Image (spheres, grey):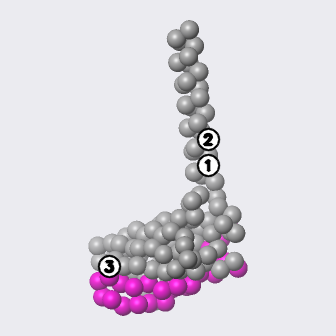
Amino acid sequence: MKKKYVFRMAVVFACATIVAAFMLALPVQAAQYAGNYKGFYHGVEDYGVFVLTFDPGGGISGTATSGKTGAEVPLSGSYQQAGGFQFKSAGMVFNGTVDWMSRLNGKWAFANNSAGGTFGAVPGNW
């Protein structure tokens, strides 16, 4: 009896793990991530905050403020329905994805690829 119970629990756990992995891999639909996002970026050479708007047509606009220099720069870019996106300023390029919880995650680099780091953002009304 005990072996049967252990086996059933192992099967339930395995099924739950497979379902969770599948849900994490699902792409987000465009209607779910059109909106406003606020986030941060950090790296060895620069760090700061940004605010973005993903419009329903696939465009991205916003501003970033460097915590190192205090400079505010405009951002623009685009996103695809599968969840990938790119936005940039005159000196920085950000590439990332939207996850199943509508969070932005990715990597950034200076336009000349001299340095970079990571970034993240959450949706909200900013």
Residue 120 point in image, percent of width and height: 45, 68
| Amino acid carrying mark 1 in the image | Met
- Highlighted range, magenta: 57-82
Q: Which residue is mark 3?
A: 46
Q: Which residue is mark 2?
A: 19
Q: Is residue 5 visible?
A: yes
SS at circle 2:
helix
Q: Earlier in the sequence, mark 3 or mark 2?
A: 2
Q: Which residue is mark 1?
A: 23
Neighbours of disc 1 within 10 Å: few (<14), some (14-19), many (20+)? few
SS at circle 3:
loop
State the quadrant of the N terminus: top right
**Residue 78, which numbered label?**
none
Label 1, label 3: how many angstroms apart (C-alpha)?
A: 34 Å
Q: Earlier in the sequence, mark 1 or mark 3?
A: 1
Residue 103 point in image, percent of width and height: 53, 65
Label 2, label 1: how many angstroms apart (C-alpha)?
A: 6 Å
Label 3, label 2: how many angstroms apart (C-alpha)?
A: 39 Å
| Amino acid carrying mark 3 in the image | Asp
Q: Which mark's residue is nearer the viewer, 3 or 2?
A: 2
Please give left or right for residue 93 compared with residue 33 in the image. left
| Amino acid carrying mark 2 in the image | Val
In the current view of this chain or complex, which residue is farthest to the top?
A: 1
SS at circle 1:
helix
- The residue lying toward the viewer, choosing from 96 and 54, is 54
- Who's the residue at 50% across and 68% down the image? 122
